Amino acid sequence: MWGNAILTRKPLEDGFTLELPRAGDDDLVEPAGAAHELAGIRYADADPGHREARCVVGGTVDGVAVATTHLTYVGREQRRRQAEAVRSAVADGDGPAIVTGDLNGPLDACELAALRAGFDDAFAEVGVPEGDDRRRSCGPWSIDHILVREFDVISCRVAREAGDLSDHWPVVADLRPR
């Protein structure tokens, strides 16, 4: 599993790690005819890395449900099932929540619909629309996101000044509970 972590000054209550769905051998990486180099290829015939174990970690801090994840980078159907599992991990509560992570796609991608439902996009809340260069967090891509429920977003930005210790820059948001 990838090294997902939540760092907090206060104790994480009810902590959890849940394995996310992985594709089966006979599942197609992408449907036949899709505009992708792996269209029509079964996972059994693809690089094993395309089916790496992924997880979501989370818990509760001061009554706020928090979770972070790193979804698969290949296979939209696999990513859709993972996004649904992440939403299920935090959707049971009806209070404030924060979901962060490398979702490996723009937030408006169809496979991320489950995460858009019931959460506010921190960038959109401060007026930064999809496709805006200010969202770029990994080279030319906007694939790292902060989603919130029952929070006002004061600011949200990509911290490019963080340097190049990773192929991703951190996404930082200032939040205020509603």
Image (tube, grey):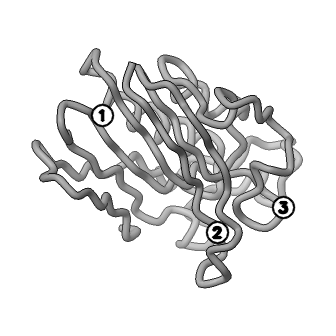
Q: Which quarter of the rendered picture does the N terminus lie within?
A: bottom left
Q: Position of residue 20 (x, y in %)?
A: 37, 48
Residue 67 badge: none
Question: What residue is disc 2 on?
Answer: 168
Label 2: how many Cα within 10 Å (few below 14, some 14–19, many 20+): many
Q: Is residue 141 left or right of residue 97?
A: right
| Amino acid on which the number 2 mark rests in the picture | His
Q: Are marks 3 and 1 in contact (CB under 8 Å)?
A: no
Q: Position of residue 115 (x, y in %)?
A: 52, 29
Residue drawn 80% across and 50% down?
134
Picture quarter containing residue 8? bottom left
Picture quarter containing residue 33? top right
Determine the secondary structure under disc 3.
Answer: loop
| Amino acid on which the number 3 mark rests in the picture | Pro
Q: Is residue 99 left or right of residue 12?
A: right
Label 3: how many Cα within 10 Å (few below 14, some 14–19, many 20+): few
Quote the CA–CA distance across marks 2 and 1: 25 Å
Between marks 3 and 1 in the image, the one whose residue lies nearer the viewer: 3
Is tag 2's residue or tag 1's residue first in the polypeptide sequence?
A: 1
